[in-house]
Amino acid sequence: MNAVVHRNWFVNGIAQVGACGLFFIDILLALPRSLRHFRETCRQVWFVGAMSLVIVMTCGLFVGMVLALQLYYTLSIFGGTAALGTVVALSLFRELGPVVTALLFAGRAGTAVTAEIGLMRATDQIDAMEMMAVDPIAYVIAPRYLAGVVAMPLLMCLFNALGILGGHLVGVTWLGVDNGTFWGNMTSTVDLWKDIIDGVWKSLAFGAVVTLIAVYQGYNAPPTSEGVAYSTTRTVVFSAIVILAVDFVMTAFLT
Amino acid sequence: MPAIPQSVEAEPLVQVRDLHARLGGKSVFDGLTLEVPRGSITAIMGPSGTGKTTLLRHITGQLRADSGGVRVAGEDVARLSRNALFALREKIGFLFQNSALLTDFNVFENIAFPLRQHAKLPEVLIRNIVLTKLQAVGLRGAARLMPSELSGGMARRVALARAIVFDPMLILYDEPFVGLDPIALNQVLRLIRTLNRTLGITSILVAHELAAIRQVADRVYLIANGKLVAQGAPDDLAHQDSPWTRQFFGGEADGPVPFHYPAPDYASDLGFAR
């Protein structure tokens, strides 16, 4: 009995991944048509990007502050506090910036997108579009997908900027690290292509998978309040797992 | 405009032929056959859960049959490509039970939505068309209201204005009278009749309200157990002597549609040995 249950769980999981892949192809095919709805795409960039600024920037500031505190303590053991700016920047650009921004994005924008599309499905708005001969993939899904992919790297840049500002506040203003050393070591060590652009690639990949999960869960949400709630939860859970798994794979290849 | 050949004009607009379909593993249609003549108002009635809304979804090509099929304006809906199906849907209006207005748009934008998507019209013309449709349903003054500010009856009328924005050949009404007070019900009823009589739009109406159906419908099809069990003019059907019509129109709790959902033997279910 248990073997049957596990097998069903496994087969369903594979089927879901396959369905999500086909859905992704549908979105790619609809992208050129969705450019007709450019205003809708801009509205979605505002909705998933600009509306996430407060949480991303606030968290970026605090993550930078905590990083500086922890790293100052560790570096001081080896007498290397002069490297604080470098280590804070590398941690943010290469790892924490893309990953934490993606996790915050999944919690703030991913859930909102899933719930919105799920409710559109539950209130027959998606069916109404199909009946008006309007392709919901091109009008509803593709603009949201594009907006998520565009917004994620931009949010990550702001997260990193605020993180470095937080690190500077704690390291230079509070703990007394020399201002010139902080910036000088950072700018001489951090490499544009190897560190910053690699982080942008990661961020683009996270934007692509998190938004795909969000729109897929919303579009296939059972048309009940419980179904929408369940799909919204799944967006956060699946996104968190996929972000960390993709991060591991990309780090292994990019390092 | 080219004249429609006599044979095409005489052909029913919607033909359902020996439709067999399953939904969620359960048989919904088991050889359903019916026809909807052009220019008529046809009501589809039947017990809850019998597949009336599902039938509308087969007519619009949202669902595919296991066998048999649906022809609309001579075209086999199941065989149409996606583009051809969308082209057909531009000629069909669909009134959803819950109106299905787009909640991000106000009333005006909801009605303008199909025009903006399919017709490259100047803004002035779009405005005039939308206001004409709103005037027809008596809601020109509500053009700037959001869907959340509308009553159920008003939302239904806005959805109707949206459904007729392209002057369709066919309108499908899914439970248009549910949840309406008598005033709103009569308003919707009058609109259905007016659209049919003045524009010659063929209408298919899924509803339970016999009194309302009697006022507008030319013909009623009674569906049960996936089949057509009775048909005729509304007044004739109510007086037909068949177990189905007796139970349905008489509102009897038990009959061909059983009161009890199929279940194991009651005594054994309670644990009493026989």
Image: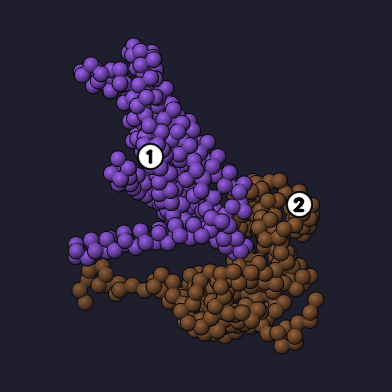
- Taking the spot 54% from the left edge, 76% from the top edge, the residue there is B78
Chain given the colour purple: A
Q: Which residue is mark 2?
A: B123
- Please name which of the two marks, 2 or 1, marks the residue nearer to the observer: 1
Using the image, determine if residue A114 lies above or below residue A91. Answer: below
**Tell me, what hue is chain B?**
brown
Q: Position of residue A165 (x, y in %)?
A: 42, 22
Query: Is A54 displayed left or right of B263 in the figure?
Result: right
Q: Which mark is residue A241?
A: none
- Taking the spot 24% from the left edge, 64% from the top edge, the residue there is A7
**Of A18 and B171, which appears nearest the observer?**
A18
Type of amino acid under label 1: Asp
Q: In the rendered view of the protein, which quadrant contains the N terminus of chain B?
A: bottom right
Q: Quadrant of residue B15?
A: bottom right
**Of B53 and B105, which appears nearest the observer?**
B105
Q: Which residue is mark 1?
A: A198
| Chain of the residue on which disc 2 is drawn | B
Q: Secondary structure at mark 2?
A: helix
